[in-house]
Image (cartoon, grey):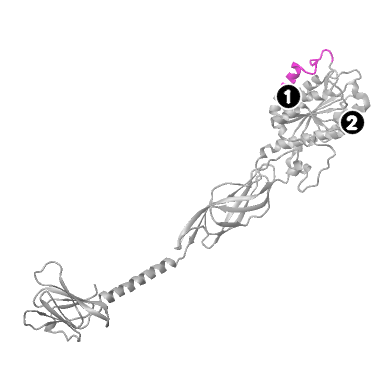
Amino acid sequence: MKPFTRSPRATTALRRGAAVTAVLLAALFAAGVPAAAAEGPSREEVYRQLGVAEQPVDYVILVDTSGSMKAKGRYDTVRSTLRTFLGGLTHSDHVALVTFDDRPEARYIGSAGDPAAIVARLPKKPDANGGTDIGAALDQGLRELERDDAASVASVVMLTDGKHQPPRRSAYPKSSGPPWKALRKRADALAQRTELAGYALPLASGASGADRLGDVVDNTVVLRPGSIQDLGRYLQRAGDSTRARSAAKLLADDQGKGVTASWKPAGVRDITDGSATASVTFRSATAHVPLTVSDARVSAAGAPLDVSGVPRRLTLEPGESRTYSVRLAGKPGGGGPFRHTEEASAVLRVSGQVSSPWQKALAPGVDLKVPAAVGATGGPLRVRAEVGSALLLPGIILVLATALVLGALRWLSVNRPALTGVLTAAPVFANAIPQRFPLTGRRVTFRPHGGGHGTVQGRRRRTAQGPRVDLLIRYVPDGATGRPDRVVCAPGARAVVGGLAFTHRLDSPTPAGPGFAGVRPEGPR
């Protein structure tokens, strides 16, 4: 069997990247390749779910009825195979059956619902003396597709066994020139508002007339049966290609659309205990195509969290949303041992492979171009936690307070030790009875009879004989200014300051009497 080829204009059309050529036609691949068993729905099941059969398609079928078609039973084969081909169409499809020899003639225009009735409109045999005016046939076919209620998908199928050989008065006397350019211009205008394709089937070697379809319809495929007996298979291929184009038309808005995921709702989660729950919503953006996410994994960027609870594989119907409850494990990072609140923004990250169970069934005719990655949308999830020790700061405060108390006690024991004994005071140069001041507490204020005032406090110190408490005596005579005079008196010793002689006696103080006037013990200072 000879391989089929594309016309030069069809090749050019594919390079343009027009909407029609965006769909690789399944019928363009070599015949006889068995369909591989695969998981997921079959192509027919996908077509049923899409409702391809309900989508109207225009078919213009141009049948050569020139005298040469009688050879080798070509015309009879065309009649029988056309009936099978038309049987694969639906009531919603529109058929224009046009025969051409010296001139074109519309044999049937209407619904494709009754194949036998349509084929019965064909002449029983070709015109033995008829020529082959392919230009006029294409003109007739384009006029049918230019009607106001034309479908958005259209196919022109041409079956001929010869070359363009028009009668003398034909508007297309040659195989090229201005009339053909005008046809091409009309076909290009049609392609702007409908998805137009051509299928040319040369039924004999040297049937160059089939190539003329490619001169007019940009997106034309020339199918070359090895013999007239292959015609049915090639016609079926053209029909399958048209259905693939119809499916691609329905799926055009779904191309490039995939799956997105987001936190729902965002809000704030408290993970002081090391875990919390949140929700992740997966949403399909397609209108027709089901999508599957394989090896799905959810993580959070910006916060040291483990996220679990999303199934490894999930399938979304067109436009479907699914929300999964997930568990967040971990805490926001942060320094410091003290109890405080840490906050972080958990940005959703989703890994996995997005695909469609329809892709294998539709390939190679339709490429869904599903984005392979899940897109993360929406804002981050706010998380917070109380971190650090709740006892550390109070403990430190307690230690510091204890240290301060101990330090104060130590300072008091050194600089304000408890006083004992009696301090006597008498003028140095006068013969008078010493005045007695009992030493109690940590500081004593005294007022001698001779006037003035003073204070006595202890000062602990270490000596070679052991610790002892000296007396620090401060005295200000009456009328004196400035800092008070001071002197240190050892235990049981005598010291002079401000004209007074002070003597420390270690015996216990006697009960209060006249000798104790002017003495007032004080607390620590």
Question: Label 1 is placed on what type of residue?
Answer: Ala
Q: Determine whether, in the image, residue 328 is placed left or right of residue 430.
A: right
**Residue 159's spot in the image, x, y percent?**
84, 27
Q: Is residue 437 above or below residue 369?
A: below
Q: Which residue is mark 1?
A: 187
Q: Is residue 98 visible?
A: no
* Quarter location, residue 16: top right
Q: CA distance from mark 1 to mark 2?
A: 30 Å
Residue in front for this viewpoint, 240 or 226:
226
Task: Look at the image and tell me in which quarter the C terminus lies.
Answer: bottom left
Residue located at (83% from left, 21% from top): 105
* Quarter location, residue 145: top right
**Residue 365's spot in the image, x, y percent?**
75, 38
Question: Label 2 is placed on what type of residue?
Answer: Ser
Identify the magenta region.
167-187
Residue in front for this viewpoint, 444 or 170:
444
**Residue 270's spot in the image, x, y percent?**
51, 58
> What is the secondary structure assignment of the residue under circle 1?
helix
* Quarter location, residue 399: bottom left
Q: Is residue 460 visible?
A: yes
Q: Nearer the viewer, mark 1 or mark 2?
A: 2
Q: Which residue is mark 2?
A: 227
Residue in front for this viewpoint, 9 or 250:
9
> What is the secondary structure assignment of the residue under circle 2?
loop
Residue located at (21% from left, 82% from top): 491
Residue located at (27% from left, 75% from top): 414
Residue in front for this viewpoint, 35 or 482:
482
